[in-house]
Amino acid sequence: MRVTVFGASGRTGRQVIEQGLERGHEITAFARDASRFGTSHERLTIVEGDARDPEAVATAVRGSDAIISLLALMKAEDEPEYSEATRTIVEAAERKGVPRIVVTANNDVFGDDEVSGEFAPHAREHRRNRETLKASGLDWTIVAAGWVVDEPGIGSYQAVVDAKAAKRKIAPRDLAIAVLDALEHDEWIGRIVGVTNQV
């Protein structure tokens, strides 16, 4: 499968690229700074740009079978950069005929209960992305995790469709497994899937 990955230089993004290549996919990695990639591979193409730039995004998704977006709002004051990027990616996918998209989120994507304090902007952005995906004509899946922790991971995960996972933590390695698996789970299309790697 030909897969374009946004947020490719982050901790989960690097795992998605590594594991995606191991699975035999052709990967286009989209990042703000291409110099952050110190490795090369015959099936890895790196595109540098801003995910809110329609031209750069269109170049990255052209010819792909699927898109994975691991983008996140890094600072509250950057709202709504994250949802603007997601909208740009979705619009490019629709124009270029890329049918499948998997987007990561936190558990605030489930429901619309008020979230206050420092996490409120993050919740709003995830929910904007949810509505953008629902309004699109794409085969979308949202993979939602409570808390991505810097741990080695266990090489597996637990998934719950349309609900939060019972436990909150998941390692980047295991979230990457879930995201790549989502591309192959047709029953997850149009669904929000809660994931954890805690037993």
Image (cartoon, rainbow, N blue to C red):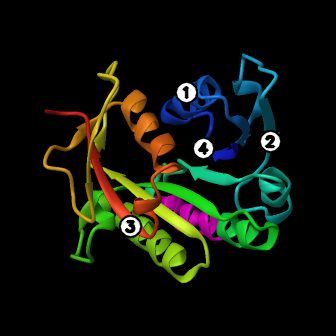
Q: Which residues are magenta?
A: 77-87
**How many other residues sit within 10 Å of disc 2, few (<14), some (14-19) or many (≥20)?**
some
* Circle nearer the viewer, 3 or 4: 3
**Structural crowding at the residue carrying mark 3, measured as other residues with C-alpha within 10 Å and reported as few (<14), some (14–19) or many (≥20):** some
Q: Is residue 36 left or right of residue 115?
A: right
Query: Do labels 4 and 2 touch, CB within 8 Å?
Result: no
Residue 152 lies in what quarter of the image? top left
Residue picked out by circle 1? 19
Asked whether, in this view, residue 7 is left or right of residue 151, the answer is: right
**54 up-or-down from 70: above or below:** below
Report the front residue among 156 and 88.
156
The residue under label 3 is which amino acid type? Arg
- Residue 83 within the magenta-colored segment of the rendering: yes
Q: Residue 23, relative to residue 102: is it above or below? A: above
Q: Nearer the viewer, mark 4 or mark 1?
A: 1
Residue on which the image places disc 3: 191
Q: Earlier in the sequence, mark 1 or mark 3?
A: 1
Disc 1/disc 3 C-alpha distance (Å): 23 Å
Residue at position x 49%, y 69% in the image: 129
Residue 106: quarter of image: bottom left
Which of labels 2 and 1 is toward the front?
1
Q: CA distance from mark 4 to mark 2?
A: 11 Å
Residue matched to label 4 = 7
Q: Residue at x 65, y 68 (%)?
A: 90
Q: Which residue is mark 2?
A: 48
Tell me the CA gap for discs 2 and 1.
21 Å
Give the label on residue 115, or none.
none
The span from disc 3 to disc 2 (Cα, nearest Å) is 30 Å
The amino acid at mark 2 is Glu
